[in-house]
Image (cartoon, helix red, strand yellow):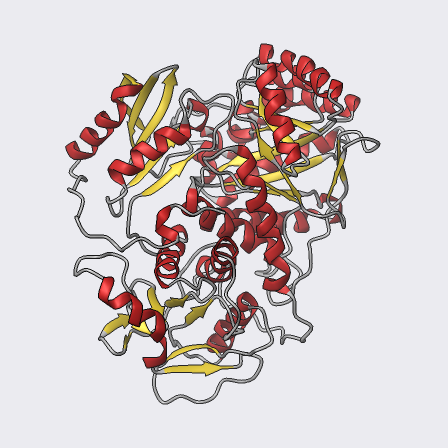
Amino acid sequence: MSPTAFCASPYTYRRRPARTVRVGDPARQGLTLGASHPVALQSMLTADTMDTAACVRQTLDLVAAGCPLVRLTAPTVNDAANLRTLVHALHERNCHVPLVADIHFKPEAALEAARWVDKIRINPGNFADTKKFARREYTPAQYQAELPRLEQRFTPLVRACQTQHRALRIGVNHGSLSDRILNRYGDTPQGMVESALEFARIARQHHFHDLVFSMKASSPKVMIQCYRLLAARLAELGPDWNYPLHLGVTEAGDGEDGRVKSAIGIGALLCDGLGDTLRVSLTEDSTREIPVGRDLLAQIPALTQSTLPVPPLPLSFDPFTFERRLTAEIPLAPEPVPCGGDQPVRVVVTRAAHRLLAPLIGAGDEMRPEAVYEDLDVLEVDPLSDLPPSPHARLVTVKDGVPLPPIAAFRLLAARLKQSGRNNPILLKDRLDSPAPPLPPPIALLRAAVAIGSPLADGIGDAILVRSEADPGASLRLAYTILQAAGCRSFKADYVACPSCGRTLFNLQTVTARIKARTQHLKGVKIAIMGCIVNGPGEMADADFGYVGGAPGKVNLYVGKKAVRFNIPETEAVDHLVDLIRQHGKWIDPEQHALPKSRASTGRSA
């Protein structure tokens, strides 16, 4: 498979051509995905699906916020049947926004929901298969022998959607691949793609093409690889496999962390021309997802537009498998901080920012400037031209004023270095137009996360400089947050926190805030906070500890994939979680010093 098969060009923006899929009545508030239609935002209700009044209220709030597509869960046949009442109540209020029913485990609920809503989302990992982390060796013949069972379970829904003119999203989640897929492909992007294609082939056998794909993961890096591989496989299968793509980073969390994770994953793919609809999944009120998504979409032109011809150099990286670019290790001035090689990606600040930050940094602070830009021995180049000679392995970056968007510029720089056989470490910059007017903080966060996070996900970058955010403290924190979200460094605990939905068994926002208040200082510890078993052990498979809703008012605690404490009263569950972390030797007492408050650290949000 060609390394560039996932997009038209890794250096010049061109949107992926996708077939048209209609969702809802086009004569009313119906939506058309794909082709040249704008990328559509969507969100999800958090109310119980049986609570019609609450669902109506939340739907109207989302529509008022500018949401053109609303999803809600239908975990049982009774929930799905109540969609009829909900649709009628919305129509009485002259609201005809397309509705999507989210189905897990129950094909019967999907069939009922298809009678009333405009689109069905199914997860191949739990629609017809099981998820028990069972190990089994499959021969090719045994694997193929199980496919008729999938067809038997899935075909009735395909026929129902075909008859009733419903769209269908085949939504694969990284943490909920079936045991059958895991045993054949492992926990890999290839497994996610093949899981989706199995269901798509069944739909195509019945000449049903109103399909949308999604490949969600809580890691932006994994999510990017999955969507790229899917896009490449679809292109390989033929031009009539050009189905629209729904983008999203699942369980991104809340606040700055959730926004940065979402911006890296979704933004990187949008800049590659992928994506026809998206959801920014935040552990916050659903209406807050819409302005973030709108702001993110608004950044893509500035991050992609260029009229210059770019030389068609081979990519320096494999877009389907992460591997950090091999570089020489060099010291950064003025302090001998090692950079490149196996060293963590370093954080660089301007001299003006360092002057303000230096008096505020304590000896043990995790967030600290590691070099001053103006003091670096850095080679600034124009990657549109051949690289100038350099007698030693200096740090290299794209010089300001180069008329290229930053992602394309740094990809081209890495390609130039590989072509010339040089292993210089690279300094990434989120803007190449300095000096430039500062951006509003919510926009600065998104712009920097996409511009720096995308190359980091490609394995490019040994140091970073954030200039979009004017406030020095906020800029420093944002730099470290981007590195943590991209999987490059850890300076605090990491959280996999699902957004609320009608299945949630506790208040996710409140509980997430309580857990963060107790555990945020635990550098390198990953904690999953899941509202129900659907987003339980599978979705948090790479977390150290899990806090999962087991029943109303009751919580189950996990270590990795294994549940170790059951039915703990919610009022006691956070204390039990801390105790569990202590038992496993991962607890430390919080430090007293911290970076002084800035716009970033006082809870500002987009």
State whether residue 399 is above or below residue 49: below
In this rendering, the answer to whether 339 lies above or below 376 is above
Tell which of 74 and 298 is nearer to you.
298
The answer to which image quadrant residue 563 occupies is top left
Counting labels gives 0
Name the spot of residue 402 as percent of width and height, x first: 56, 78
Can residue 99 be seen by looking at this rendering?
yes
Quadrant position of residue 333:
bottom left
Extreme residue toward the top, this view: 78
Nearer the observer, 48 or 548: 48
- With respect to residue 380, does 243 lie above or below? above
Q: Position of residue 570 (x, y in %)?
A: 31, 20
Q: Residue at x 69, y 35 (%)?
A: 211
* Quadrant of the frame with the N terminus: bottom right
- Identified at 40% across, 24% down, the residue is 132
**Residue at point 69% right, 53% down?**
16
Quadrant housing residue 312:
bottom right
- Any part of residue 340 in sight: no
Residue at the (48%, 72%) spot, across then down = 414
In x, y percent, where is residue 393?
35, 81
